[in-house]
Each structure stands twice: as structure tokens, then as C-alpha cells.
Image: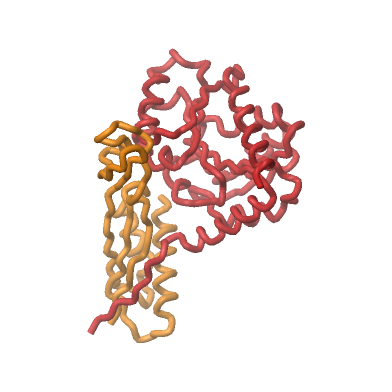
Amino acid sequence: MHELALAESIVNTVKKAIKDRPDAKVLQVRVRIGELTDIVPDSLQFGFESLIMDTPIEGAKLEIEQVPINAKCAGCGHEFIVEEYMFICPECFSSNVNLIRGDELEIIDIEIE
Amino acid sequence: MSEKIPVEQKVLSENDKLALEIRRKLAENKIVSLNLVSSPGSGKTSLLEKTIIALGNKLNIALIAGDVQTENDANRLAKAGGKMVRPIVTGGACHLDARMVTKSLMEFDLTKIDLLFIENVGNLVCPSSYDLGEDMKVVLISTTEGDDKPLKYPGMFRRSSAMVINKIDLLGMSDFELARVKENALKINGNLKIFEVSCRSEQGLPDWFEWLDSLVKQRKTEP
């Protein structure tokens, strides 16, 4: 449900980024979303589309790049993709593992013409 | 011709900036801060009531109680003896954000606080994205819920530092199994500190109080 609030942040960032370029048409906004954020891409997409309706950036596409969870074992140093949220090293079975990717919630870039 | 404007910025960068500022202020005043998260009805307010009663004379406890509607929780905490209690009524928002907490903190004298609790809105999804500047998140789960909850809301259990299992006086009345919930939670977060309590029978609560007390002591002795 907070996807709408996140979409709003994205739209505000886009508006700020193009405020000195009134003629720019926003084609696409790229965002990076990690699996651990529990964000539903469809809901984010829907929120974004609803918010830009009847605004100067109407028609812009939201491109969502999803990032799987990657972790590194603090014991043996093995790096692995976390599947089904099992934060357990497949090499040494330690549960002392650190997240290295999968927590992202970032705007990458904005494509304009 | 199209052109790309690089942004490379967190979606919640505004929130994160405020959270950083909160964290700085709390550290400056040597305040231990816990962000309490759970489903509705797990017992966040009950746990805080018991905590105020047990530790209120010993520690200066401040509480920020978030709810979608009503100030009922804040009223309960004040009634339990909470001297510094501020409600946040989000008016529909499913989580607290750093802006709301910043505003509430302005109403406290930070030099007089040892321990700050932020009782988040009952929700295991949305609050996990919002840093409130706290030292750590504490997730509550109760024995009247499913013991697979950690698997359903892994983000929250991964981001929490401690898990309080409440209503253990009701074990056996449902299919909830203590061993299973712990196994599920530890798969996601092997470093989770676990407490088993009942706010009703007060079983297990001393361990929780002792832990809070030790966090405060540790903070005071830090350089």
C-alpha cells in the first residue's frame, strides 16, 4: 500500500530533475528495486501512472529493474544468491551472512527528449 | 534525440536525510531508540505498558505512538504511567516516516530521555522501508498468529534486530509452534535476538526489561 507514497517520491524527483527544462518530454524513468523491499512492481507502476495523469510528464514509462538478494557469508566469504529468503550460507551453513544486494530502492536515471 | 539524466538517488532520500539527522541527535543525547513493528494486535502497546510500569521509575522513557486513527494507544501509555508520550495519527498512512518522528521529537527535551520507543503502525510491510533514525527495529509476533509469518514478511524480520514472541501463555491453544516460528525467523536473520513473553501473565518479561536496561547502560558508558 505504501507503493503510492513511493511513486509520489519518484514523481517529485522527476519533476525536480527537469524543472530547468520546461520543453523536455519525459520518456522513461528507470528505478532499481531489490527483492527484500517487499515492493510490488505492479502497484508501483499503477501508482506512478495514476500520479502523472494530466501532468506535464503524462505518458512517461516506469522501467523497474528488479534486483535479487545477494549475500556474503561472514564466516567463509562465499557470495551467493538468497533464494526464498534463506540467509544461510550454502557452503558452510553459517547463518551469519551479510546482505550485499537486494535492498535497493533507487532512481537510476530519467530519459527525456 | 533522447537524452538520459543520471539520478542515482534513493527513492526515499528525503526520508533518509531526516532519519540521519534524528540518529545524530539521539546519539548526541545518548538515547537508545527502538522502532516497534508488528501486525495489528500482536501486543506492542501492552508490551510498552508493562515496560513503563517496570522501568519507568528507573529510566526516563519517551514514547511515540503511531496509529492510523485515534490516540487510544498514546492514552493507554500515559495511563500506564508514561510521562513523555506523543501520539502520531497518520490519518490513513500505513507507516510512520522520519518527518513525523522529527516533529514529535521537537516536543521532547532530549536531554531528559534514556530510552525512546517508537510504536509504529500495525503493519509488517510498509514500515520496513522507512528508516526513522532508530538504533534498531524490534518485531513482535504473537502466538495467535501464524508461525510462518517470518516467511511471509521476510523484509521486516531481516531488518529487525530482535523478535518478541508475545502471548506465550496461550501456547497450545492454537497451531502456533514456538520452535517453528524461531526456525523460520532465524533462517531469515540468524542474528535475531529472541524473547518469549506473555504481557498478560508477565512470563518472560524480566529478560526483556533486563535487555533494555543493559542497552541504556551500554549507551551511557560509550565514549
User: B38 above or below A60?
Assistant: above
Residue B187 drawn at (x, y percent):
35, 32
Residue B8 drawn at (x, y percent):
37, 67
Residue pictured at 47% horizontal, 62% vertical: B13
User: B106 above or below A91?
Assistant: below
Taking the image as shown, residue B79 lies to the left or right of residue B64, namely: right
Residue B14 drawn at (x, y percent):
50, 63
Q: Report the quarter where the N terminus of chain B lies.
A: bottom left
What is the display colour for chain A?
orange
Taking the image as shown, residue B77 lies to the left or right of residue B196, namely: right
Instruction: Pick the residue in front: B156 or B94.
Output: B156
Residue B175 drawn at (x, y percent):
38, 18
Residue pictured at 25% horizontal, 81% vertical: B2
Looking at the image, what colour scheme do you see? by chain
Residue B71 visible within the image: no
> Going by the picture, which residue comes out furthest to the top?
B172
Residue pictured at 57% horizontal, 44% vertical: B67
Taking the image as shown, residue B141 lies to the left or right of residue A47, namely: right
- Among the 4 quarters of the image, the one containing residue B125: top left
Residue B40 visible within the image: yes
What is the display colour for chain B?
red
Residue pictured at 55% horizontal, 30% vertical: B43
Instruction: Pick the residue in front: B53 or B208.
Output: B208
